[in-house]
């Protein structure tokens, strides 16, 4: 068999993250998934109707969106992602999969009551242009649900070392499951992210942070290390060291 394409490798990684044998890795990603799913349900109670997910990746939110919204549009950049997602939405007549680039979108203006954009902005060279694209397609008073890594989180700082040539092979052996470079090219601090949303005309209604990654403890301390990281995260979340947490989340309104 030939080597997997980068797109296939990325999908395999997505599916590993939420079922990882490593307790910390699994916790970091499941926490984000569960927070966003809960916010989707809340947003649907306030603004039902039509939803859009920008860059749906593994498609983990598609069924949740379909259960809460009359119409769901889900976009990504390549055919492989679209083909992979078709099996997940089989039988869901209210989900439409499309190839689209939010920085130069062809979607109709002012059309969506909710836009979900999770772990996408950091992969875009000009994330502010993507936020402007979201602003273009969201209906007046509509809601946007965004998550993206924090620029100086312990996870992102560690990744700069972990993905160096030679070291990444050691990391893969330690985890014994898919580990790929993040492809994060546009990391933002919390202040930069808030400025970008407010600069595009959004009013931030809710903020949250999660994901304390502790190097070596995450890899070698097992469930006890995960429990310690979770305990410490709760104490850091609202303090001056919250920049250490991996993911920042926002619910904002147009």
Image (cartoon, rainbow, N blue to C red):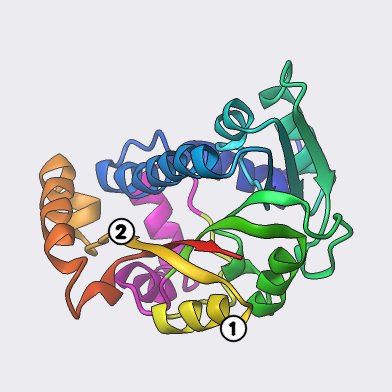
16 lies above or below 185: above
Question: For the N terminus, which image quadrant?
Answer: top right
Q: Is residue 131 visible?
A: yes
Left or right, 139 with respect to 106, comes to left
Q: Nearer the viewer, residue 70 or 176?
A: 70
Residue 35 x/y as whole percent: 38, 45
Residue with the mark numbered 2: 210
Residue 188 x/y as whole percent: 48, 79
59 lies above or below 216: above
Residue 111 colored magenta?
no
Of badges 1 and 2, nearer the viewer stands 1
Instruction: Identify the residue shown where x is 56% and y is 38%.
Output: 61
Q: Is residue 248 visible?
A: no
Instruction: Identify the residue shown where x is 70% and y is 64%.
Output: 134
Q: Nearer the viewer, residue 95 or 180?
A: 95
Which mark is on residue 136? none
Say if mark 1 contacts mark 2, CB within 8 Å.
Answer: no
Instruction: Examine the residues drawn in magenta and state their main secondary structure.
Output: helix
Question: For the C terminus, which image quadrant?
Answer: bottom right
Snapshot quadrant of residue 3: top right
Question: Secondary structure under badge 2?
Answer: strand
Residue 201 x/y as whole percent: 61, 77
Residue with the mark numbered 1: 199
Crowdedness of circle 2 by 10 Å Cα count: few (<14), some, many (20+)? many
Question: Secondary structure under badge 1?
Answer: helix
Left or right, 113 with respect to 239, comes to right
Magenta-tinted stretch? 150-179
Instruction: Identify the residue shown where x is 38% and y is 58%.
Output: 170
Left or right, 238 with respect to 177, comes to left
Looking at the image, tell me whether mark 1 or mark 2 is earlier in sequence order: 1
Residue 170 colored magenta?
yes
165 lies above or below 196: above
């Amino acid at each position: 068999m030939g080597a997997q394409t980068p797109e296939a490798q990325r999908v395999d990684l997505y599916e590993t993250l939420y079922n990882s044998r490593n307790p910390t890795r699994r916790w970091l990603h499941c926490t984000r998934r569960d927070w966003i799913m809960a916010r989707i349900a809340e947003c649907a109670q306030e603004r039902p109707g039509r939803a859009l997910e920008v860059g749906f990746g593994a498609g983990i939110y598609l069924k949740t969106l379909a259960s809460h919204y009359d119409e769901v549009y889900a976009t990504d950049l390549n055919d492989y992602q679209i083909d992979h997602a078709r099996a997940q939405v089989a039988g869901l007549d209210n989900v439409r999969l499309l190839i689209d680039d939010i920085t130069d979108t062809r979607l109709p203006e002012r059309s969506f009551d909710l836009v979900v954009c999770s772990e996408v902005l950091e992969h875009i060279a000009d994330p502010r242009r993507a936020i402007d694209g979201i602003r273009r397609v969201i209906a007046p008073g509509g809601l946007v649900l965004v998550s993206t890594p924090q620029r100086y989180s312990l996870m992102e700082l560690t990744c700069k070392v972990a993905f160096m040539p030679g070291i990444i092979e050691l990391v893969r052996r330690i985890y014994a499951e898919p580990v790929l470079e993040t492809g994060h090219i546009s990391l933002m601090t919390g202040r930069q992210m808030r400025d970008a949303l407010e600069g595009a005309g959004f009013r931030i209604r809710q903020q949250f942070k999660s994901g304390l990654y502790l190097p070596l403890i995450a890899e070698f301390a097992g469930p006890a290390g995960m429990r310690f990281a979770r305990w410490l995260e709760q104490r850091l979340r609202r303090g001056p060291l919250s920049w250490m947490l991996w993911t920042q989340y926002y619910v904002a309104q147009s």
